[in-house]
């Protein structure tokens, strides 16, 4: 029997409408009853993407957004989209099929193939028609190169579209029917090589890098496609990999050509051949700027072998790159200060014991570097949150341990340090429940835990706070935190709850905030069943049988039931 619920905090949903992430809830919620009861707050664009909202969409077909329906993995959603393909074709918008081309479900792939191969009544491919919302298409009255590439960019990351991508680059008919696009949007027909724009970071260059970055993230990319990515990177090297339009900055716009592609290769942990190809390329280029640009992928992929090989390149300091860099002479590859800072701070985030050993082995350099560049705060919060950094935190507690950040550390063995520095916790900044702010530890049910880093940090905060309370530590904010981790408290004090990230929790959490169980209604609904059950259990004939089975007098058996 499903529980009966009473809606609460309805005013909050109305008055704090903009704070609650309804768009994300619309596309992600897996509780159909919650969706139906809150449909007035939800986005039909988001609902159109939601697998679990399919019954609601079928009841409201006029509100379905066909573009967003392309992301829906429900087979019936693809059936409906197939029945309405001509609506999208006739709109002739640039992005009409973007989400469909990223959809990796079996039904979606069949529909993608159909879209790519459909012809108009005159036998011309629908996908080759110019778009009405593209200035270049309008100017030439033909489908422009940018629009052609757009479809391939969306297919590039689709794990189930590998056969389509291979057919395109091999210049073969898709499913034996016909070729799906002009190969020369990427490949020079004269020499068979990838076409690289001459001007760095023009629109064509950005589109090319976006395509190969997406392809590098494809977990099912074949050996053939991986070789194609390597050809692209090597062509970039030939044309001047080290050319940029400005000094090193932290933004992607100043990264080296193709560094994003190599980074995504290293981060594609589900495709081992892709990772190995990425390692081969970074070893071949062996440039500190590229290594620094790719450190996020190295850290996330825990590629300690690359760190072992290259960390020695990041000891020397040169604040200005006055001397030219010779790509063939490693001796000229002295990193500037920002590259060096980026490498060592990223290394502090790496959750690998050997990474921490490298820091300890070079602690004299690290200490001097931190002091010289005023980076103590950066190193402190990264190391204090790193579950593999316990040894360095214990040895250099005074320099690199910060209890506020350590509360987010999932390593249970860090608790003695937290307990030791209990009096240093900045309670007002971190744990104030006087108003909703993003610094509060998120409030959520224990069974909602998963491995996402943001949620993991809040799980760790709760565990450490619970342990402190159990060990007798007391503080008004600590006691407030303990109270705030119950549904009842949150329902009755919604102003204390940070609702900005509600979509990251399961629907049961939202139900706990906006509903409570109606026990009286449930009793009333089951009154007939309860009467029947009582009549059966206490029927005289049954009681007589029970008394005989226990070999006691009937009156004694009745007395035992009182």
Image (cartoon, rainbow, N blue to C red):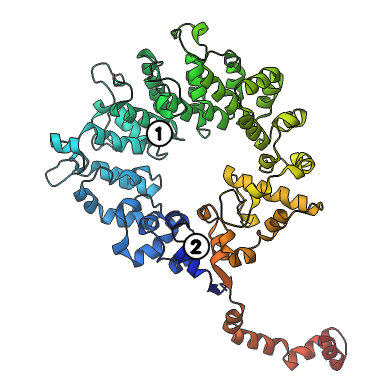
Who is closer to the viewer here, 480 or 310? 480
Dividing the picture into quarters, in which one does residue 51 lie?
bottom left
Quarter of the figure that contains the C terminus: bottom right
Who is closer to the viewer here, 33 or 471? 471
Q: Is residue 143 visible?
A: no
Quarter of the figure that contains the N terminus: bottom right
72 with respect to 433 (left or right): left
Q: Residue at x 14, y 35 (%)?
A: 139
x then y, percent, for residue 308: 62, 19
Dividing the picture into quarters, in which one does residue 50 lie?
bottom left
- Mark 2 neighbour class, 10 Å CA radius: few under 14, some 14 to 19, many 20 or more: some
Q: Residue at x 25, y 52 (%)?
A: 85
x then y, percent, for residue 5: 55, 73
Q: Residue at x 41, y 15 (%)?
A: 242
* Disc 2: which residue: 31
Q: CA distance from mark 2 to mark 1?
A: 32 Å
Numbered mark located on residue 232 in the image = none
x then y, percent, for residue 157: 40, 37
Q: Secondary structure at mark 1?
A: helix
Of the numbered discs 2 and 1, the one sitting upstream in the chain is 2
* Disc 1: which residue: 214
Image position of 399 with respect to 328: above or below: below
399 with respect to 16 (left or right): right
Who is closer to the viewer here, 267 or 334? 334
Spot the residue most to the left.
122
């Amino acid at each position: 029997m499903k529980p009966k619920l009473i809606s609460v905090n309805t005013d909050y949903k109305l008055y704090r409408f903009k704070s609650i992430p309804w768009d994300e809830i619309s596309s992600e919620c897996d509780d159909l009853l919650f969706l139906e009861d809150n449909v007035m707050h939800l986005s039909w664009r988001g609902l159109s993407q939601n697998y679990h909202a399919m019954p609601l969409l079928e009841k409201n077909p006029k509100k379905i957004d066909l573009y967003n329906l392309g992301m829906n993995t429900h087979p019936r959603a693809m059936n409906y989209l197939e029945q309405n393909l001509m609506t999208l074709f006739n709109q002739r918008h640039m992005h009409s099929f973007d989400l469909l081309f990223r959809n990796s479900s079996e039904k979606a792939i069949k529909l993608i193939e159909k879209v790519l191969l459909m012809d108009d009544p005159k036998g011309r491919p629908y996908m080759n028609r110019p778009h009405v919302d593209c200035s270049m298409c309008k100017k030439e009255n033909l489908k422009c190169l940018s629009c052609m590439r757009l479809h391939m960019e969306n297919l590039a990351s689709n794990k189930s579209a590998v056969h389509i991508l291979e057919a395109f680059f091999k210049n073969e008919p898709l499913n034996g029917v016909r070729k799906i696009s002009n190969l020369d949007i990427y490949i020079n027909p004269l020499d068979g090589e990838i076409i690289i724009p001459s001007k760095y970071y023009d629109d064509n260059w950005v589109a090319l890098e976006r395509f190969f970055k997406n392809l590098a993230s494809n977990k099912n990319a074949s050996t053939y496609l991986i070789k194609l990515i390597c050809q692209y990177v090597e062509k970039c090297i030939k044309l001047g990999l080290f050319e940029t339009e400005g000094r090193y900055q932290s933004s992607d716009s100043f990264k080296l050509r193709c560094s994003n592609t190599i980074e995504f290769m290293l981060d594609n942990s589900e495709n081992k051949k892709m990772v190995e190809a990425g390692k081969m390329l970074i070893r071949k280029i062996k440039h500190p700027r590229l290594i620094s640009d790719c450190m996020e992928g190295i850290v996330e992929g825990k590629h300690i072998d690359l760190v072992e090989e290259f960390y020695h390149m990041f000891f020397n300091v040169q604040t200005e790159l006055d001397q030219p860099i010779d790509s063939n002479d490693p001796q000229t590859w002295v990193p500037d200060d920002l590259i060096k800072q980026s490498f060592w701070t990223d290394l502090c985030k790496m959750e690998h014991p050997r990474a921490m050993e490298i820091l300890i082995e070079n602690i004299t350099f690290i200490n001097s570097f931190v002091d010289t560049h005023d980076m103590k705060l950066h190193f402190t919060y990264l190391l204090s949150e790193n579950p593999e950094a316990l040894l360095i935190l214990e040895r250099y507690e005074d320099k690199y341990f910060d209890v506020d950040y350590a509360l987010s550390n999932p390593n249970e063995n860090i608790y003695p340090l937290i307990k030791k520095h209990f009096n240093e916790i900045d309670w007002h900044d971190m744990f104030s429940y006087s108003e909703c702010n993003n610094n509060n530890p998120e409030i959520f049910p224990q069974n909602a835990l998963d491995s996402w880093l943001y949620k993991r940090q809040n799980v760790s905060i709760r565990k450490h706070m619970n342990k402190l309370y159990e060990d007798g530590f007391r503080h008004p904010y600590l006691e407030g935190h303990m109270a705030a981790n119950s549904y009842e408290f949150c329902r009755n004090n919604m102003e204390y709850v940070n609702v900005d990230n509600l979509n990251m929790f399961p629907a049961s959490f939202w139900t706990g905030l906006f509903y409570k169980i109606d026990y009286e209604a449930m009793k009333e609904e089951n009154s007939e069943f309860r009467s029947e059950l009582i009549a059966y259990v206490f029927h005289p004939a049954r009681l007589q049988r029970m008394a005989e089975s226990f070999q006691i007098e009937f009156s004694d058996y009745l007395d035992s039931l009182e």
